[in-house]
């Protein structure tokens, strides 16, 4: 797609080798172009939009904005300077990559970015398109800061709702190790008292073998307690990571580690419903946010668990597969629950649409998950049929320079719990 900032013959007239315009055309176009530019500035002035024209070297050719409030530097200082000079090398690099790609392919690019301005951190949505007959691009920028803030609140609300669902299971997971830690501490206390008594007793009553046996029992109880404490710390760490929210920039994420951490959080929710069958192959990292990715996995796993009625775990299973398909990391979460009709599948990612009873869900989980995966450059799809269960499929692109094992097929070692 291309846009004409000026008419073709005007471009030719301004280029060094272009033929000059006849006087009558030049006179007729001048006022028209001035009027068109005035209209454009008036329309842009009614919105928070900004229009940039940038050349192949990253130099600002033109800027149309209502004010300088949403600009990194005032227009007068930016015009004629490069992105590198105005934004700095780190922020300019992804812009330059997109500019060169748009100039080379002619395809429009849409993306989001953030800038630290005097007014605070602001988010923008940008559409970049090549200008016809010129080595420049036009970038239409819209301020989406309020939308991003609302999205972050919705994501946090969904995260807290998921934690509420997990609360009973987490309490059970913590209670088990806590019970034997307390029991072991009582045993160790009694053992230390016995050792104290034996150390003060006459030699014929306190043999070395008796002392060593008591000491070994205490050490064994201590080791068991340490294991239980580590289990609680691991669970608490997973909860803290999941609950805190993470607005850090995207980075390389270990998908297998995120998936395992999420499975550890929701094991209790599965018990009494189905067997968990895991097939987690080695995959390369993806660009994204680990906390948000774990939120997606938790939403999908809870949906799978809750689609299966309690009471017949031997008849049902939830399958989790992780593998590489071409240049994408793929996560499949499949259940043998009741499934969904086609009409329901069409609305499954709509905000506030829920298949659960009133009060049992926010209806935001899948919508938010869809938005998170889309922003990571991936896609999420669902296959389902009544009586045959449901399968959600998350596909995430791997960076060109990602390192890691890339199996040629989705096969892998499977195990069940």
Image (cartoon, grey):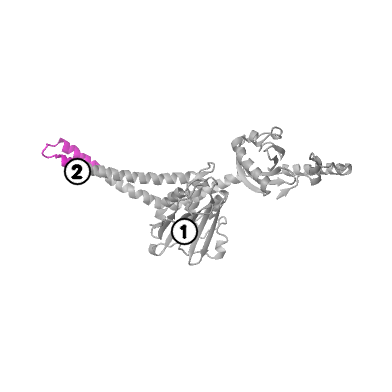
Kindly identify the residue that appears in the image at 22 percent across and 41 percent down.
215
Q: Looking at this view, is 119 or 27 the one in front?
A: 27
Q: Give the labeled residue for mark 2.
A: 213
Q: Which secondary structure is most common in the magenta stretch? A: helix
Few, some or many residues within 10 Å of mark 2 (<14, 14–19, 20+): few
Residue linked to disc 1: 304
| Location of residue 371 in the rendering, given as x and y in whole percent from the top left corner | 56, 51
Is residue 311 among the parts visible in the rendering? no
Q: Position of residue 415 (x, y in %)?
A: 39, 57
- Farthest residue in the right direction? 24
Q: Are marks 1 and 2 in contact (CB under 8 Å)?
A: no
Q: Which residue sits furthest top?
A: 77
Q: In this view, which residue lies farthest toward the left? A: 204
Instruction: Give the mark toward the camera: 1 or 2.
Output: 2
- Crowding at dot 1, Cα within 10 Å, few <14 / some 14-19 / many 20+, comes out as many
Indicate yes or no whether the magenta region holds residue 196.
yes
Residues shaded magenta: 188-213
């Amino acid at each position: 797609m291309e846009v004409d900032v000026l008419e073709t013959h005007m471009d030719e007239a301004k280029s060094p080798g272009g033929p000059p315009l006849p006087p009558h055309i030049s006179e007729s176009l001048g006022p028209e172009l001035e009027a068109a530019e005035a209209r454009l500035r008036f329309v842009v002035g009614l919105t928070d939009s900004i229009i940039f024209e940038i050349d192949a070297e990253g130099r600002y050719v033109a800027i149309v904005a209502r004010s300088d409030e949403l600009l990194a530097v005032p227009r007068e200082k930016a015009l004629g300077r490069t992105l590198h000079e105005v934004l700095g090398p780190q922020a300019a690099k992804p812009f330059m990559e997109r500019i060169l790609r748009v100039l080379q392919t002619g395809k429009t690019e849409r993306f989001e970015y953030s800038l630290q301005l005097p007014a605070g951190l602001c988010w923008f949505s940008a559409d970049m398109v090549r200008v016809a007959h010129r080595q420049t691009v036009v970038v239409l920028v819209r301020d989406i800061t309020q939308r991003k803030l609302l999205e972050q609140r919705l994501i946090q609300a969904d995260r807290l709702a998921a934690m509420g669902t997990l609360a009973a299971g987490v309490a059970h997971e913590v209670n088990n190790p806590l019970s034997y830690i307390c029991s072991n501490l009582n045993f160790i206390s009694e053992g230390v008292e016995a050792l104290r008594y034996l150390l003060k007793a006459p030699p014929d009553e306190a043999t070395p073998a008796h002392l060593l046996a008591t000491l070994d029992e205490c050490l064994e109880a201590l080791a068991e307690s340490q294991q239980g404490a580590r289990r609680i710390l691991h669970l608490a760490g997973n909860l803290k990571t999941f609950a805190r929210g993470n607005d850090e920039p995207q980075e390389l994420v270990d998908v297998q580690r995120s998936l395992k951490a999420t499975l550890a959080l929701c094991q209790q929710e599965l018990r009494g419903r189905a067997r968990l069958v895991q097939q987690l192959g080695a995959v390369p990292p993806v660009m994204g946010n680990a906390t948000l990715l774990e939120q997606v996995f938790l939403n999908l796993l809870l949906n799978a668990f809750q689609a299966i009625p309690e009471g017949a775990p031997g008849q049902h299973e939830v399958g989790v597969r992780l593998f590489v398909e071409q240049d994408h990391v793929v996560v499949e979460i499949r259940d043998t629950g009741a499934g969904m009709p086609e009409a329901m599948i069409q609305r499954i990612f709509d905000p506030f649409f829920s298949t659960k009873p009133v009060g049992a869900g926010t209806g935001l989980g899948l919508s938010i998950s869809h938005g998170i995966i889309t922003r990571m450059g991936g896609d999420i799809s669902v296959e389902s049929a009544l009586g045959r269960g449901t399968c959600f499929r998350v596909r995430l692109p791997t960076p060109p320079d990602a390192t890691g094992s890339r199996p040629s097929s989705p096969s892998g070692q499977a195990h069940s719990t």
